[in-house]
Image (cartoon, grey):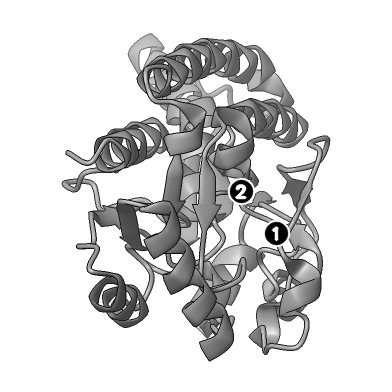
Amino acid sequence: MFPTTRFPRRALLAFATLALTAWSAQAQAPIQAVASFSILGDLVRQVGGDRVQVNVLVGPGSDAHVFQPTPAQARLVGQAQVVFSNGLGFEGWMSRLLKTAGYKGQQVVVSQGIEPMKEAGHEEKKGHAHGAHDHGETDPHAWQSVGNAKVFVKNIAQGLCRADAAACDVYDRNARAYVAKLDALDREIRAAWAPIPVAQRKVITSHDAFGYYARDFSVKFLAPQGVSTESEASAKGVARLVRQIKQEQIKALFVERIADPRLIDQIGRETGVKPSGELFSDSLSAADGAAPTYIDMMRFNTRALTTAVRGE
């Protein structure tokens, strides 16, 4: 006969409690997600909540057009369970990064299902260099449409559900709540533009980042650069823009946070129009800045634009 070992009841309960705690901690470990740039990172956080740890590759104040991934970021991608990108040619470096990282997990292109716009004046700009991140004819800045942002949120929720089916109800609930906020934001922006005649809604910006906003809210944006900040503005194009500003008495002249302000400053000097400030196009601000979230960014830009167009 083998001796029977009896454990005290308290020891068994303590062991069971420890095992349950360890299992619970493992089950609740956050999903590791990577988002390509700061605006997308915020949308993923809104849907994922506490269940998702979001790591952003191109952080606030940085330019995804000229981004070069580091080895540390490649390792971060390799460890992720789901990677979110904008698509539409915005992240020209993404396929190389995924290959370098040996990534085999979920890939979500959040712009899937939207109707892409073509870059304004693409044929005219073909003769000028667009750098390594040429978007072809497609304007990738789809997030500038609140309606498109709602499609992004739907795709994000579906991607998180595939990566973490146990929490799918949480992601769907978060997505629905956030879409309601986006609906309210869209109404707010339309109300802000409503008193301003459409013929007066003309704005100069650094590069063509606001085409979707222009379409949704009937604003005409003119820019010396193309849809990429690597585009080169031609002297002929700048001269034509200067003439147009003078002829049409355009009052709103903006530089973007990620752009070199010298070209806009030059246009301001040649036209006598004082730059109206800065806009957020491809990046959010830091947490303590004016636009730490997507909704904050859209509100900030709308206030700045409508104030400048009115000549205030």
The secondary element bearing badge 2 is classed as helix
Residue type pointed to by label 2: Gly
User: Where, quadrant-wise, is the N terminus in this rendering?
Assistant: top right
Residue 198, given in percent of the width and then of the height, sits at 50, 30
Residue type pointed to by label 1: Ala
Q: Is residue 69 visible?
A: no
Q: Is residue 39 left or right of residue 124?
A: left
Residue drawn at x 56%, y 16% as measured from the top left: 179
Q: Residues within 10 Å of mark 1 (few under 14, many from 20)?
A: some
Q: Which mark is residue 211?
A: 2
Q: Which residue is mark 1?
A: 120
Of the pair 186 and 311, the residue shown nearer to us: 311
Residue drawn at x 65%, y 50% as measured from the top left: 84
**Residues marked 1 and 2 touching at CB (< 8 Å):** yes
Q: Is residue 311 left or right of residue 223?
A: left
Residue drawn at x 75%, y 88% as measured from the top left: 127
Residue 221, given in percent of the width and then of the height, sits at 52, 51
Q: Residues within 10 Å of mark 2 (few under 14, many from 20)?
A: many
User: Where, quadrant-wise, is the C terminus in this rendering?
Assistant: top left
The secondary element bearing badge 1 is classed as loop
Measured Cα–Cα span from mark 1 to mark 2 = 8 Å
